[in-house]
Image: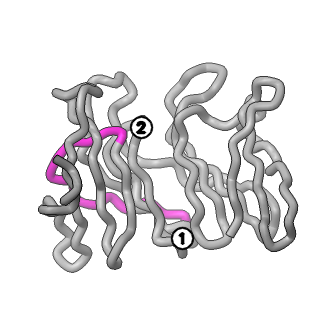
Amino acid sequence: MVTLTITKPHGVTTLSVYDPEKACSYDLPPIPEMVDGLPMFSQIIEVGSDLMVIGGFDPVSWRVLDSVFIYNFKSMSWRRGADMPGQQRLLFGCSSDSEKMVLVTGGHNDDKNVALRSVLLYDVEKDKWIVLPNMVMERYECKCILTEGNFHVIDGYTTCTRGHHFQQSAELFDFDTSQWCIKDNFFPYIM
């Protein structure tokens, strides 16, 4: 397993990787379309032998990005993936099944005034996005995890709370019924 580090030499955000098996670290080459550095607030996730950089802000123009960049550790090169469909989103949750699928959940619109309920699933091998049913609740700055074979979306803010307190709840996507449901007692330690 490699360890990923985000560094900022000379004011440009880059990715460095530490490989414990080889006991060495190295910088990944810059994303060809992003020579001014990584997109700010992008999601970075490992899927199989790939590393994905999804969305964020262009560090120069501050334009919201729907782009997907994929670094393959075997070929040691970047490629462009299919852009995220639908409205642009920021501060979304993201998780992977560690093999070939990536889930993107919630976030807020590029005007930063509406939290989203929408959900996308990306198949890395097919370079294809699938629109899934909306979550029960809108959420931005949420976290996603894969546990017990299901994707869970945890916490996040709503349009009404606007960063004042987390939801302290979780939703589970049931692939058999293609529905989201609130997961009770997901946080027994939260008061």
Q: Amino acid at mark 1?
A: Lys
Describe residue 152's horizontal placement relative to residue 176 as left or right: right
Describe residue 163's horizontal placement relative to residue 144 as left or right: left
Q: Nearer the viewer, residue 154 or 81?
A: 154
Q: Main secondary structure of the magenta part?
A: loop
Q: Nearer the viewer, residue 190 or 107?
A: 190
Q: Give neighbour class at mark 1: few <14, some 14-19, many 20+ (Cα, 10 Å).
A: few
Q: Which residues are magenta?
A: 127-141
The vertical placement of 188 against 30, above or below, is below
Q: Are marks 2 and 1 in contact (CB under 8 Å)?
A: no
Q: Amino acid at mark 2?
A: Leu
* Residue at image mark 1: 126
Image coordinates of residue 169 in percent, x first then y, are 19, 51
Disc 2 element: loop
The vertical placement of 146 against 141, above or below, is below
Residue 88 image-quadrant placement: top left
Disc 1 element: loop
CA–CA distance between discs 2 and 1?
25 Å
- Image quadrant in which the N terminus is located: bottom right
Residue 76 image-quadrant placement: bottom right
Describe residue 64's horizontal placement relative to residue 69 as left or right: left
- What's the mark number on residue 185? none
Residue 131 is covered by the magenta coloring? yes
Q: Residue at x 67, y 37 (%)?
A: 38
Q: Give neighbour class at mark 2: few <14, some 14-19, many 20+ (Cα, 10 Å).
A: many
Image coordinates of residue 145 in percent, x first then y, are 38, 62
The vertical placement of 176 against 123, above or below, is below
- What's the mark number on residue 91? 2
Q: Earlier in the sequence, mark 2 or mark 1?
A: 2
Q: Nearer the viewer, residue 62 or 93?
A: 93
Q: Residue at x 73, y 46 (%)?
A: 15
